[in-house]
Image (cartoon, coloured by chain):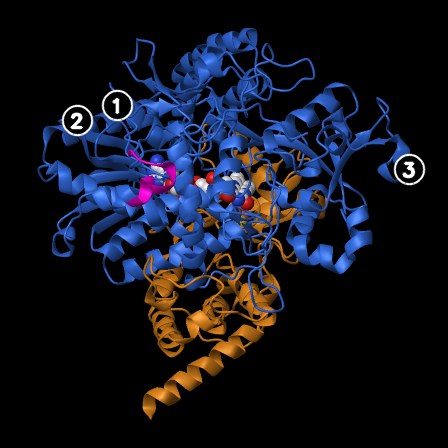
């Protein structure tokens, strides 16, 4: 297969950046999207040009490192799939493919397709945990957790923190990411003690990082590679409301 | 170099308790005076960094990914072992200990493994308290599954994402400490050297992967939790970034490297589809709880699987190992798969594959249950191969997965350089010649949460070392060396890409030092690796510059280290004239093809000491003494 790629190239955070066209030749349908980029990069290096910088690590859809907007859609638009798990058999021979980085004020571009997602870490640092030290914890079976609750917590905990939700949102809102973490912990009995503080601290940090507001367009859910449900946002809003109410009384 | 494993005296079951009591303590107010450097934020590094910060130490933590949450541990699928005996099926600390020693083919240290089994129960308690959503029964209690090499159900899991959930637990604990200022986190930062002053580890040299800045960090102890070296084979189930740089550079500063030839080939991975492939994908061992492994009885049978009748199928694991069946340990299952493929009975392109069939499980349990247990794995399989494994059997083949070898450490997890501790997959300590499934997560968290935090205090309290200072000439020397190396890589400006060297090295390693090794193949590798390395330093092309984000430069440094390390791995494999666990020497097998261990001559840990660039490394032997278990021939029949 052959493709024309239009790729965002940007030397560093201060550069303005531009789209540059490349030919991707002799691509095999079984290649992953990133393997296709590897091939293009090998060609660029051979010509003495700098390869296209993009982030990846596990290449199996779990680490959340890869982060490409492909033809305008975060991770390329195949349901429940990260860019590293997207395969070329889903593209048409001869197609033009545009590749851009996540675009959001809170995720500045560092180079080409690589962005800084440190804002997500700082949100978790603000309260996305249960405050237990190592040691001295009760037996794991001391607190039974209903399977339904536990499964729901797991649904939320499945978030890989890739940031596609932010990239897809016209407001660059981080609500789905934050809601997933808040819900995972607030749903469990172990996490209930700090429920109110958690949600307020995380939301405060989210706002401080410059993410936009949620207007419930659902575009985040549509691109989420782990198919995290929009319902968690409603859940978090409830938790947040309750916390504010308690704080004011 | 004199290696002392420092195994505490006394009965096996009481060693750790007694040792904990005997070790010196640092009083709480003094802890904040100690700076601890932790390299790595996987299960081992994140749990260690968080726990030490909770205790009051001042911690700096480094990782090369953009966030500590993305360490390779995130990819672990199947589960984590613990001797909880919640299933009342006869499990105990002793049984987990015994299974692990036997699984490791009697090449692990008894005392370490016993301690691992003991603390396994605390790990589950800790993780549940952190909110790790392990799978549960309807009654609300935790549930378990079985893994290879065990006849009890002791594996805890969170769907097919156990590593992710455990790592997020540790990452959250770490984030809490970053948030309250007790840990300073350095993501996108790669450690490139250890600084040793007067024989003690005193700091590290790192490169900021965004700006290219190379800088020094001083600490009273250095902890490496940098993962395994499976990517020396290029294709493996490891993440792209996994590398040997940290432990290799520590080796060159005096930290002996143990058992590099003990590498694990995992039986159930998606087969290679072509030259372009950048990595291999694991299909979790947990699938073997319900999937049946088979190939056609006839050679070269190209009929689609559903047209091969039952009586013409060879369920070779069930046939050869009736008491463990499809759950035979990894080394044994991998070799069995290779054997049937070598006989010409493999399936799929190139005949390099065997079937993993769920038809019967779906009939027995129903589609829904199978989906609930494994949906994410089936989805992953479909994304990569385009095939639906609910309808047609998966095709799988062995692939490099885990490395049991690593930096030599004593019972306190300290390397042969005082003050340098090594945890998790990066050390060699607990799995002998073969690791059982679901035991790496257990070991990483045991090391980080429950062992290092005790033993590091003992080091501080008993050594009374002077405070480390980046102005010491050794720091400057190390800085200059790292800068010079970086400059050299960028100036070669040859014709071949970094990844073409890596691929070629991987091919040599897989063909000559993979699932079956012979003296001749190893000797061939030992001539080809130095040739390839020499070519690398003449002909590699590293584009770009140092002062920016430069992924080619990062890769070049890692491949340069693999090109040196590979030689040590092959040398170790050549000197170990026996077959044990993942190390199979064709010359040493029983007539039925089973591995032939030689306890009389090889019941020792090989620990290699660096002697300088022009001298061969020196082999030290740490004898393995078994006080409690009897070294038997390992049988799963
Ligand atoms: C696909 C897959 C599935 C697995 N499934 C299971 C399972 O079900 N059960 C099980 O028990 N085990 C499993 N394993 C094995 C297990 O996941 C690993 O052995 C374990 O997670 C390793 O943890 P670690 O903390 O030692 O290292 P890692 O998680 O690899 O972390 C290494 C850390 O070191 C950092 N680092 C490395 N080098 C440098 C450097 N030079 N400078 C700075 N930072 C550096 C990295 O950034 C990273 O943070 C699996 C492995 C794979 C590949
Ligand atoms: S590279 Fe890990 S999710 Fe894509």
Verify whether residue B9 appears in magenta.
yes
Q: Do the residues labelled 3 and 1 touch (CB within 8 Å)?
A: no
Real-space Cα separation, disc 3 to disc 1, in angstroms: 59 Å
Q: Using the image, name the chain to which the residue with label 2 belongs.
A: B
Tag 3's secondary structure? Answer: helix
Identify whether B185 is placed above or below A172.
above
Q: Mark 2 points at which residue?
A: B199
Q: Name the residue under label 1.
A: B254
Q: Mark 3 points at which residue?
A: B307
Specify the colour of chain B: blue
Q: Is residue A195 left or right of residue A30?
A: left
The span shown in magenta is B8-17
Mark 1 nearby-residue class (10 Å; few <14, some 14–19, many ≥20): many
> Which mark is first along the chain, 2 or 3?
2
Residue ID at (27%, 47%): B453
Tag 1's secondary structure? Answer: loop
User: Quadrant of the rendered structure where residue B582 is?
Assistant: top right
Verify whether residue B33 appears in magenta.
no
Identify whether B525 is placed above or below A191.
above
On whether disc 3 and disc 1 are found on a single subunit, the reply is: yes
Q: Using the image, name the chain to which the residue with label 3 belongs.
A: B
**Residue B385, position as x, y percentages in the image:** 71, 41
**Depth check, front residue: A34 or A91:** A34
Specify the colour of chain A: orange
**Depth check, front residue: B128 or A183:** B128
Quarter containing the C terminus of chain A: bottom left
**Depth check, front residue: A176 or B8:** B8
Quarter containing the N terminus of chain A: top right
Real-space Cα separation, disc 3 to disc 2, in angstroms: 67 Å
Identify whether B588 is placed above or below B29.
above
**Residue A33, position as x, y percentages in the image:** 60, 43
């Amino acid at each position: 297969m052959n493709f024309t790629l239009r790729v965002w190239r940007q030397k560093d955070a201060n550069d303005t950046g531009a789209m540059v066209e490349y030919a991707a030749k002799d691509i095999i349908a079984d290649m992953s999207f990133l393997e296709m980029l590897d091939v293009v990069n090998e060609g660029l290096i051979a010509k003495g040009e700098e390869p296209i910088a993009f982030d990846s690590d596990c290449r199996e859809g779990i680490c959340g490192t890869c982060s490409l907007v492909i033809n305008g859609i975060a991770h390329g638009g195949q349901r429940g799939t990260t860019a590293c798990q997207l395969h070329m058999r889903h593209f048409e021979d001869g197609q033009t493919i545009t590749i851009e980085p996540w675009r959001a004020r809170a995720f500045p571009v560092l180079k080409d397709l690589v962005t800084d997602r440190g804002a997500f870490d700082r949100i978790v640092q603000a309260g996305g945990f249960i405050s237990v030290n190592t040691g001295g914890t009760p037996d794991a079976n001391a607190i039974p957790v209903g399977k339904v609750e536990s499964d729901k917590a797991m649904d939320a905990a499945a978030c890989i923190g890739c940031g596609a939700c932010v990239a897809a949102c016209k407001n660059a809102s981080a609500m789905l990411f934050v809601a997933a973490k808040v819900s995972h912990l607030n749903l469990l009995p172990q996490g209930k003690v700090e429920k109110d503080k958690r949600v307020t601290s995380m939301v405060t940090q989210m706002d401080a990082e410059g993410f936009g507001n949620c207007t419930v367009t659902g575009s985040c859910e549509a691109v989420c590679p782990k198919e995290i449900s929009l319902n968690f946002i409603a859940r978090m809003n409830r938790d947040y409301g309750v916390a504010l109410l308690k704080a004011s009384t | 170099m004199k290696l002392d494993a420092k195994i505490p005296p006394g009965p096996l079951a009481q060693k750790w308790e007694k040792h904990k009591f005997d070790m010196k303590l640092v009083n709480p107010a003094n802890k904040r005076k100690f700076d601890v450097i932790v390299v790595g934020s996987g299960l081992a590094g994140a749990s260690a960094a968080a726990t030490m910060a909770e205790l009051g130490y001042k911690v700096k933590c480094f990782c090369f990914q953009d966030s500590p949450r993305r360490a390779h541990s995130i990819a672990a699928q199947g589960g984590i072992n613990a001797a909880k005996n919640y299933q009342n099926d006869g499990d105990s600390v002793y049984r987990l200990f015994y299974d692990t020693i036997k699984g490791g083919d009697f090449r692990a240290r008894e005392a370490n493994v016993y301690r691992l089994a003991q603390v396994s129960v605390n790990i589950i308690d800790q993780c549940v308290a952190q909110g790790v959503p392990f799978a549960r029964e309807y009654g609300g209690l935790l549930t378990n599954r079985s893994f290879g090499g065990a006849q009890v159900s002791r594996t805890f899991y969170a769907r097919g994402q156990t590593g992710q959930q455990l790592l997020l637990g540790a990452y959250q604990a770490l984030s809490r400490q970053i948030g309250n200022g007790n840990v300073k986190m350095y993501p996108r930062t790669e450690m490139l050297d250890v600084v040793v002053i007067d024989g003690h580890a005193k700091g590290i040299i790192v490169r900021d992967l965004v700006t290219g800045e190379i800088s020094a960090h001083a600490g009273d102890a250095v902890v490496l939790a940098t993962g395994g070296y499976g990517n020396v084979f290029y294709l493996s189930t490891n993440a792209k970034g996994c590398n040997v740089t940290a432990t290799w550079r520590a080796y060159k500063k005096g930290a002996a490297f143990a058992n590099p030839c003990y590498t694990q080939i995992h039986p159930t991975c998606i087969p290679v589809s072509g030259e372009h492939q950048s990595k291999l994908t694991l299909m979790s061992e947990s699938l073997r709880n319900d999937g049946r492994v088979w190939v056609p009885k006839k050679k070269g049978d190209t009929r689609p699987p559903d047209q091969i009748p039952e009586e013409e199928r060879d369920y070779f694991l069930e046939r050869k190992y009736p008491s463990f069946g499809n759950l035979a340990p990894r080394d044994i299952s991998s070799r069995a798969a290779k054997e049937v493929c070598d006989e010409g009975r493999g399936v799929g392109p190139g005949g390099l594959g065997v079937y993993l069939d769920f038809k019967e499980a779906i009939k027995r349990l129903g589609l829904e249950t199978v989906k609930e247990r494994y949906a994410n794995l089936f989805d992953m399989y479909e994304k990569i191969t385009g095939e639906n494994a609910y309808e047609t059997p998966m095709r799988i083949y062995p692939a490099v997965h885990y490395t049991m070898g690593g930096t030599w450490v004593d019972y306190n997890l300290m390397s042969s350089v005082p003050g340098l501790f090594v945890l998790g997959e990066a050390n060699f300590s607990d799995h002998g010649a073969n690791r059982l499934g679901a035991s790496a997560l257990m070991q990483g968290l045991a090391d980080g949460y429950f062992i290092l935090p005790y033993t590091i205090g003992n080091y501080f309290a008993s050594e009374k070392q002077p405070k480390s200072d980046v102005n010491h000439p050794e720091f400057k020397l190390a800085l200059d060396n790292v800068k010079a190396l970086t400059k050299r890589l960028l100036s070669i400006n040859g014709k071949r890409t970094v990844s073409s060297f890596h691929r070629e090295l991987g091919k040599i390693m897989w063909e000559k030092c993979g699932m079956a090794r012979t003296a001749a193949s190893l000797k061939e590798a030992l001539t080809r690796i130095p040739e390839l390395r020499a070519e690398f330093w003449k002909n590699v092309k590293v584009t770009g510059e140092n002062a920016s984000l430069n992924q080619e430069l990062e890769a070049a440094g890692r491949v340069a280290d693999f090109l040196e390390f590979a030689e040590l791995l092959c040398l170790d494999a050549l000197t170990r004239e026996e077959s044990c666990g993942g190390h199979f020497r064709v010359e040493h097998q029983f007539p039925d093809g089973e591995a032939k261990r030689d306890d009389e001559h090889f019941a020792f840990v090989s620990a290699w000491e660096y002697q300088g660039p022009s001298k061969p490394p020196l082999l030290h032997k740490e004898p393995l003494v078994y006080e409690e278990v009897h070294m038997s021939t390992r049988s799963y029949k």
